Amino acid sequence: MKKHLHSFSLLILALTFIYSEASATTQIVTIANSQFTPGNFTINLGDTILFTWINGSHTTASTTIPGGAASWNQSMNSSATSFIYVPTVLGVYNYHCTIHTSMVGQFTVAACVPPDYSNAIALNISACDSPLLMDATNAIATNYQWIFNNNQIAGATNATYLAANPGSYSTIVSNSCGSDTTPTNGLTFIAGPTIVIEASNDTICVGQTVILIGTGGLTYTWSPNVDPINFNGDTAKATPTTSFEAILIGTSFSGCSNSDSINITVLSIPMADFSFTQNGNSVVTINTSSGATIYDWDFGDGFTTNNATPSHTYADAGVFTIQLIATNAEGCTDTFEMVVDLTSGISDSEIEQSISLSFNDATNKINLSSNGKINSASVKLYDISGRTINVTTDQISFNTISISTQNLSGGIYFVEVVSAENRFIQKVFVQ
């Protein structure tokens, strides 16, 4: 069995505020190949723009700029390779090259705002299993430094951190305008439940049912959640035709989950089949089974054998059911039966006229009525070749039985009723 661990990731929502000053930054704009790079960007008020010449003969000259801002017009060539501009007014600045008028650029000067978590609240986080993805993402932050138990975590400089140990976590969050520190958030882990699947048998034959029972959880989810599994809470039943893997996810009272799985092996079954020839009270079987290695015969009069193709002579006349159970190397079985009539054969005659038969096409039923007690267990139906047909019988009253023909193909069938006192056989045509 293999385990599947399931954890819940919680988001760090609580942060506190500590402010400190930070130096302004410099944005470099290169001039080369008739292009300003970058052509559009945003800086904070107090930052510096450094125009740097690479090749060609160009200028950088302001066009449309905010009111009160200083305009500029600077040649950029091999003799003048750099120019510094420090904006003093918020707003959008447009500029171009006066030599190549299609060469344009733009930048935006915004108010410099440091991260601010003054309204944040510290959390005590309980997570299922581990690790837990902690997230301190801030829209205006550019840098992060995670802290565990008051010590900086080396290399933990992303907005998120995968925390594998319980303890106290916080994050220093900063941009060019200042920094802020999140509150200290306490992290604890809750162990997931131990989920176990117990199977009635992990190896079955086609047609057999396996029962699966889960333990260790409060609620359960089985998969596959369609056939071949039918489930109710901690118990599932399956009558599969092919091997499959059953997976159970169990959730504890705390909301933590865990899972278990089990592989159910489904073995193929043989096909039991035979015919026979009859000479007087003797029958010779013709075994046409496939996929079997063992054959168990019961000739209905107490005689049994495991010969592959036996013959048998009955001591008395009568109607007997020959049963063959075919078994393959894996121990899976199939059963086939045929009736041999050593009296007058299967015919329209009956031994005593104590039972009457009728077929109701509207209700798809064969009705049997007797002047005495009749038991549905004594009723059998055969097709024209003598093969036993499995049907549903209903005991209407002590002397009336109905046989459903809902799933029968149209044709000739034989109804047999055997009791200690008599035997009734009659042909019926099902439309």
Image (tube, rainbow, N blue to C red):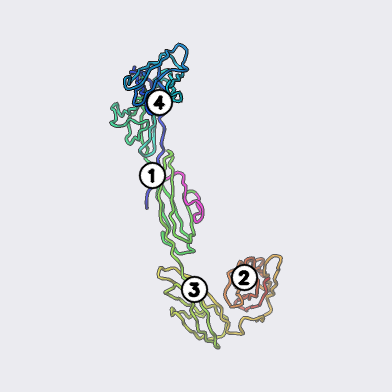
The amino acid beneath tag 4 is Phe
The amino acid beneath tag 1 is Leu
Q: Residues within 10 Å of mark 1 (few under 14, many from 20)?
A: some
Distance CA(mark 2)–CA(mark 3): 29 Å
Q: Secondary structure at mark 3?
A: loop
Q: Which residue is mark 2?
A: 375
Q: Position of residue 216 (x, y in %)?
A: 41, 46
Distance CA(mark 3)–CA(mark 1): 46 Å
Identify the mark nearer the N-term, 3 or 4.
Answer: 4
Q: Residue 36: which disc?
A: 4
Above or below: residue 353 compared with residue 174:
below
Distance CA(mark 3)–CA(mark 4): 86 Å
Q: Residue 78: which disc?
A: none
Depth check, mark 4 against mark 1: the one in front is: 4
- Which is nearer the eye, 115 or 247? 115
Identify the mark nearer the N-term, 4 or 1.
Answer: 1
Residue stretch rendered in magenta on the structure:
217-232
Q: Which residue is mark 3?
A: 272
Identify the mark nearer the N-term, 2 or 3.
Answer: 3
**Residue drawn at (31%, 29%) of the image:** 148
**Picture quadrant where residue 100 is located:** top left
Q: Which residue is mark 1?
A: 5
Identify the mark nearer the N-term, 1 or 2.
Answer: 1
Q: Secondary structure at mark 1?
A: strand
Q: Position of residue 158 (x, y in %)?
A: 35, 31
Distance CA(mark 4)–CA(mark 1): 53 Å
Identify the mark nearer the N-term, 2 or 4.
Answer: 4
